[in-house]
């Protein structure tokens, strides 16, 4: 029997973003339901790494979001701490060729102007910070604000702390519509859940959910592989990555790009990730990609040549053509809010996203200007995602 | 059959084998032999150092065994097969090659053959890539385990493992060995152990064996299987070994090694009957609850699967042993656990299909009979739903990462996990060295997700990072 | 009866391996795990979390419980390695890579 339950908001998606939306909405006193066709963290959240980075972002709306998130993650860490494996370990960005240091100086200067902490590290100081780092690297920057969580644990604990009703294993197959086309709830295979607001936190599948409301949101998948080593003692102290990575993130190229981000985990294994390529939802393991990741990691940390890779996994980052997420109410459909498209930074950006969404749900003034994240900004740019592909 | 310990080839880049067989157990050996007989150029790629797989595991030659058949029912058949293969120049045997990933080829496109990525040892150079037009997956199975308090104590070993170490190295884990769990392998293992001089105070089998009664016609069609069972039974009887049916080891005792077990009777749902506990002293315990096909190389490529009556996931194949992935065939335990004779038959059938020849009638008949028997066996030994009752919260379910059942249960009850993958993400159960091979079925049960989904395992075994970092040579036939 | 009698084994001269500094004899062709079993040794590793003793479980290279440090190289599966004369097997604590810690 289909039954209706009244909520203030239904969040579609139990990934880290949906969990953060539920957490902040519930904390503001709203009655929340979270629906996912799978379990908690069963989407990209369970297939990502937990880097909370400001270091890889140029000044702009995404960095503003990341800085807000950095603050929120610190607050959340007081509540969840070790349970989500939060580690404020800092990031170390190294240049792999002398020209790279200039690039880093320039970026750091811009970032500092908007509140990022960035400390230059001279060539001869690198190995004091990271004793296993390769010799002869020209220098780098330390970003003390960079941190790390275990994404699946983060999502699960945020969701549990929200106290939201969980409807897991139920796909949203349709939306309830009110007068004037407004969205008034969701339909799953098992029930209808009524609410004056629905949040699309469906990640890489956010475009499909938007389509259920009859609007276009061009979320596309960008595949990434991660290598996981055998359990090790702490051999890498920070999140360490090569400067080339900063360029990769901003790039719109469809080709494979990878630059190893190397990080230890409290559980022991070192994570090496992640590649970036646009191949749709192709899950096939690509040994060539694993080769590049391994080679880059070994170039940074030669000691890794003595360890074994135990596992590899892949996930599909949700990206929008301009590499910014969609956050906030959809001007085209009353009642529909979006919180998706965070690409390779959704773990980091989740708390800020959740907070901003809940502000708009309550009609309060958000901490940041949401204009750059307007969900309807691709309206009339039909071919945009194809056109920018080759930039 | 040239055996090449190091890299074979000489092979010119771009040339490739007609068929690469992964696994040199009964299925793989039979397939390689038949395929070469039909004129195909074959690579027989195997992780083991000697051919034979699990069933034909045999003493290292250096041990100088004059009567290897004493540990073996199928010795004569193996010796014949081995001799025939040795005389086949079309087969290259590549021992010590563990394939960690198979990269699918494009059928008919010579430029894009299958690439099997293998590791041959710890060194940076111990990497190999084997090129082939078609691949047969004959990687067998691993044992299924249901945890209980004390199962991580030294001296608790797997039934198949005790059997394997005895067959290959002539060693025993103890002198007084309880054999427990479910399935026909228990009888085979116990029979070998007693004939090698161990005392087996009890075989503890969780089912009543009544399940077989429902399949009398199937049994009648498989006299060989009955004879094998009878031979084990006779030997066990001779040694006064007691078979306790509808019973389970619900705890192993000891501090640094196992010194005793508690055995309890089970009801039909495998719930221990209170008050039925008995303690049996022992210095080793051999356990196993049947087998699970080892199919990650295929499922990573999206191969379709079927779930057996015991919940084990196997590859779906057609009448020609073809999987749903073009160019990929499967035979033996990878298509569902059914024993050595079935594996041999399927290997031959697959070889004919790859060569484009009609299937021989004899093997077709064997396959039909043995598959029916396998289904009966799987149903008879399927774990009862209440086995988790004996798993206390402090019992480690995942041996590698030492994750106790209580953490798994909390992930389900409090954090919203509903399947093995999510439990893994939230607790690390299944994330260790063995990648969930030992705990996977148990975690699936405890998480309430049940079985039915193959474990994801993009790498079939650990790979030295240096081997991933340095591209290796590619090889085809010399 | 013992396993060697059963199959009429006539192995060549035994080899000597060192287990935590103690000489243990191994028959040619036996794996290190089997040689230790034959010597009554069942554990050669302690776990990362609980420090619990472990040895061979599956016997065929699938469970990785039988890891130990062999000739200085950690995380070797003793059930797969044939015993060679002079092999040094050391009980491995946890991940066995403490030397790498920074
Ligand atoms: C290899 C890799 C490495 C990464 N590394 C990092 C990193 O270091 N730091 C970082 O911040 N980010 C990283 N990311 C990105 C990050 O993982 C994602 O941005 C983030 O997980 C997105 O979270 P989400 O909640 O939006 O999506 P998801 O976690 O995918 O959640 C969406 C959920 O919606 C559900 N859903 C979809 N459609 C429906 C429907 N119709 N009905 C019901 N439910 C539905 C899905 O089942 C899913 O659970 C990485 C990603 C990858 C792939
Ligand atoms: C531990 C164990 C002991 C057993 N003992 C008995 C017994 O005593 N009596 C009995 O009747 N049945 C026994 N069985 C059942 C056995 O599975 C079958 O009887 C028979 O051996 C199945 O044949 P197969 O060819 O399908 O697979 P197997 O004989 O298992 O052969 C598979 C082969 O593939 C290799 N392999 C696996 N993965 C890879 C990879 N990724 N790369 C390269 N090579 C790989 C393995 O090393 C192995 O040589 C045992 C099973 C197990 C797991
Ligand atoms: S005993 Fe299982 S891997 Fe060696």
Image: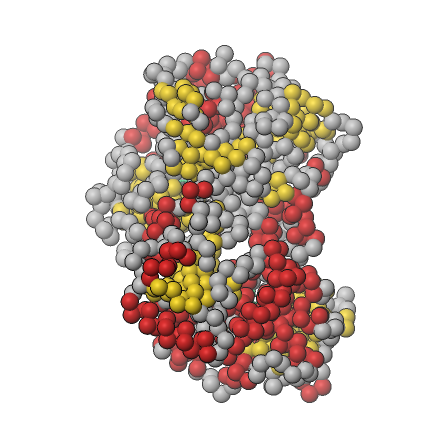
Image height of B225 relative to B367, above or below: above
Observer-nearest residue: A89 or B237?
A: A89
Image height of B269 relative to B297, above or below: above
Q: Residue at x 67, y 40 (%)?
A: B394
Observer-nearest residue: A4 or C41?
A: C41
Instruction: Answer with the quarter of the image where residue B277 lies.
Output: top right
> Is residue A146 found left or right of B386 in the rendered image?
left
- x, y percent for residue A228: 45, 52
Observer-nearest residue: B150 or A180?
A: B150
- Looking at the picture, the colour scheme in use is secondary structure
Q: Which residue sits furthest right?
A: B275
Instruction: Answer with the quarter of the image where residue A242 lies.
Output: bottom left
Observer-nearest residue: B139 or A341?
A: A341
Is residue B456 in view?
Answer: yes
Image height of B42 relative to B326, above or below: above
In which quadrant is the N terminus of chain A drawn?
bottom right
Q: How many numbered tags mark residues here?
A: 0
Q: Which residue is drawn at 39% across and 52% down?
A: A131
- x, y percent for residue C36: 46, 24
In which quadrant is the C terminus of chain A drawn?
bottom left
Is residue B365 in view?
Answer: no
Q: Which residue is drawn at 68% across and 50% down?
A: B410
- x, y percent for residue A171: 63, 66
Instruction: Answer with the quarter of the image where residue B353 lies.
Output: top left
Q: Residue at x 63, y 35 (%)?
A: B381
> Is residue A225 found left or right of A7 in the rendered image?
left
- x, y percent for residue A304: 38, 50
């Amino acid at each position: 029997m289909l039954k209706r339950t009244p909520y203030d908001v239904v969040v579609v998606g139990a990934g880290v973003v949906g969990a953060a939306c539920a957490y902040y909405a519930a904390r503001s006193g709203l009655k929340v339901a979270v629906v996912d066709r799978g379990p908690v963290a069963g989407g990209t959240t369970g297939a990502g790494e937990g880097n909370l980075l400001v270091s890889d972002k140029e000044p702009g709306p995404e960095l503003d979001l990341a800085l807000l998130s950095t603050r929120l993650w610190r607050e959340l860490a007081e509540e969840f701490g070790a349970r989500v494996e939060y580690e404020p370990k800092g990031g170390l960005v190294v240049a792999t060729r002398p020209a790279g240091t200039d690039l880093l100086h320039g970026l750091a200067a811009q970032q500092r102007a908007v509140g990022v902490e960035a400390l230059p590290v001279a060539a001869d100081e690198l190995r004091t910070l990271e004793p296993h780092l390769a010799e002869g690297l020209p220098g780098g920057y330390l970003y003390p604000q960079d941190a790390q969580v275990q994404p699946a644990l983060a999502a699960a604990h945020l969701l549990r702390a929200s106290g939201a009703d969980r409807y897991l294993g139920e796909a949203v197959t349709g939306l309830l519509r009110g007068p004037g086309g407004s969205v008034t709830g969701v339909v799953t295979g098992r029930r209808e859940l009524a609410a004056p607001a629905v949040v699309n936190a469906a990640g890489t599948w956010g475009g499909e959910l938007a389509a259920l409301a009859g609007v276009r949101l061009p979320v596309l998948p960008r595949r990434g592989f991660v290598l996981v080593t055998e359990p090790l003692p702490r051999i890498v102290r920070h999140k360490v990555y090569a400067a080339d990575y900063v360029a990769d993130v901003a790039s719109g190229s469809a080709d494979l790009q990878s630059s190893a981000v190397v990080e230890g985990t409290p559980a022991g294994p070192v994570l090496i990730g992640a590649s970036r390529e646009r191949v749709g939802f192709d899950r096939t393991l690509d040994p060539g990609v694993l080769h590049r990741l391994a080679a880059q990691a070994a170039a940074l940390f030669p000691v890794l040549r003595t360890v074994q890779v135990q596992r590899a996994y892949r996930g599909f980052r949700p990206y929008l053509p301009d590499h910014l997420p969609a956050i906030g109410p959809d001007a085209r459909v009353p009642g529909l809010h979006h919180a998706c498209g965070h690409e390779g930074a959704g773990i980091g950006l989740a708390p800020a996203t959740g907070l901003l969404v809940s502000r708009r749900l309550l009609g309060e003034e958000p901490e940041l200007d949401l204009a750059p994240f307007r969900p309807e900004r691709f309206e009339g740019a039909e071919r945009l995602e194809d056109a920018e592909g080759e930039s | 059959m040239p055996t090449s310990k190091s890299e074979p080839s000489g092979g010119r880049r771009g040339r490739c084998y007609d068929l690469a067989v992964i696994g040199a157990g009964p299925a793989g050996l039979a397939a390689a032999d038949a395929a070469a007989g039909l004129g195909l150029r074959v690579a027989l790629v195997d992780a083991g150092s000697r051919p034979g797989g699990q069933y034909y595991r045999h003493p290292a030659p250096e041990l100088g065994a004059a009567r290897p058949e004493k540990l073996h029912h199928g010795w004569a058949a193996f010796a014949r097969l081995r001799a025939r293969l040795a005389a086949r120049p079309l087969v290259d045997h590549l021992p010590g090659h563990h394939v960690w990933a198979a990269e699918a080829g494009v059928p008919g496109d010579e430029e894009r053959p299958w690439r099997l990525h293998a590791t041959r040892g710890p060194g940076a150079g111990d990497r190999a890539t084997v090129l082939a037009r078609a691949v047969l997956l004959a990687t067998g199975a691993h044992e299924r385990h249901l945890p209980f308090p004390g199962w991580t104590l030294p001296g608790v070993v797997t039934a198949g493992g005790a059997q394997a170490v005895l067959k290959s190295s002539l060693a025993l884990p103890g002198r007084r060995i309880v054999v427990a769990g479910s399935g026909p392998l228990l009888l085979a293992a116990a029979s070998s152990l007693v004939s090698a001089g161990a005392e087996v105070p009890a075989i503890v089998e969780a089912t009543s064996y009544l399940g077989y009664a429902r399949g009398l016609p199937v049994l009648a069609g498989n006299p060989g299987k009955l004879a094998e069972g009878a031979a084990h039974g006779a030997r066990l009887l001779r040694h006064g070994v007691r078979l306790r049916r509808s019973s389970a080891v619900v705890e192993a005792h000891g501090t640094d090694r196992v010194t005793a077990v508690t055995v309890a009777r089970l009801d039909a749902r495998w719930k221990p009957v209170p008050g039925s506990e008995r303690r049996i002293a022992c210095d080793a315990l051999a356990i196993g609850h049947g087998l699970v096909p080892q199919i990650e190389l295929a499922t990573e490529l999206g191969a379709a699967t079927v779930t057996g009556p015991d919940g084990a996931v196997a590859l779906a194949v057609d009448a020609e042993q073809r999987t749903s992935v073009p160019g990929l065939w499967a035979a033996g335990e990878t298509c569902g656990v059914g024993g050595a004779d079935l594996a041999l038959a399927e290997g031959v059938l697959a070889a004919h299909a790859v060569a484009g020849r009609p299937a021989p009638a004899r093997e077709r008949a064997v396959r039909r009979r043995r598959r029916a028997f396998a289904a009966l066996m799987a149903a008879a030994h399927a774990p009862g739903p209440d086995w988790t009752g004996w798993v206390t919260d402090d019992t480690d379910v995942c041996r590698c990462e030492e994750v106790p059942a209580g953490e798994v249960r909390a992930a389900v009850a409090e954090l919203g996990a509903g399947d093995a993958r999510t439990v893994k993400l939230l607790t690390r159960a299944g994330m260790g060295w063995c990648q969930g091979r030992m705990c996977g079925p148990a975690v699936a049960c405890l998480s309430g997700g049940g079985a039915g989904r193959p474990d994801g395992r993009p790498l079939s075994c650990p790979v030295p990072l240096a081997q991933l970092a340095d591209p290796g040579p590619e090889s085809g036939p010399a | 009866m013992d396993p060697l009698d059963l199959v009429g084994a006539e192995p060549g001269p035994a080899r000597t391996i060192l287990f935590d500094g103690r000489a243990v004899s191994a028959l040619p062709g036996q794996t290190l795990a089997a040689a230790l079993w034959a010597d009554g040794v069942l554990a050669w590793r302690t776990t990362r979390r609980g420090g619990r003793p472990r040895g061979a479980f599956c016997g065929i290279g699938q469970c990785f419980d039988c890891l130990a440090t062999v000739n200085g190289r950690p995380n070797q599966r003793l059930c797969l390695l044939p015993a060679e004369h002079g092999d040094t097997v050391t009980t491995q604590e946890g991940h066995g890579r403490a030397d790498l810690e920074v």
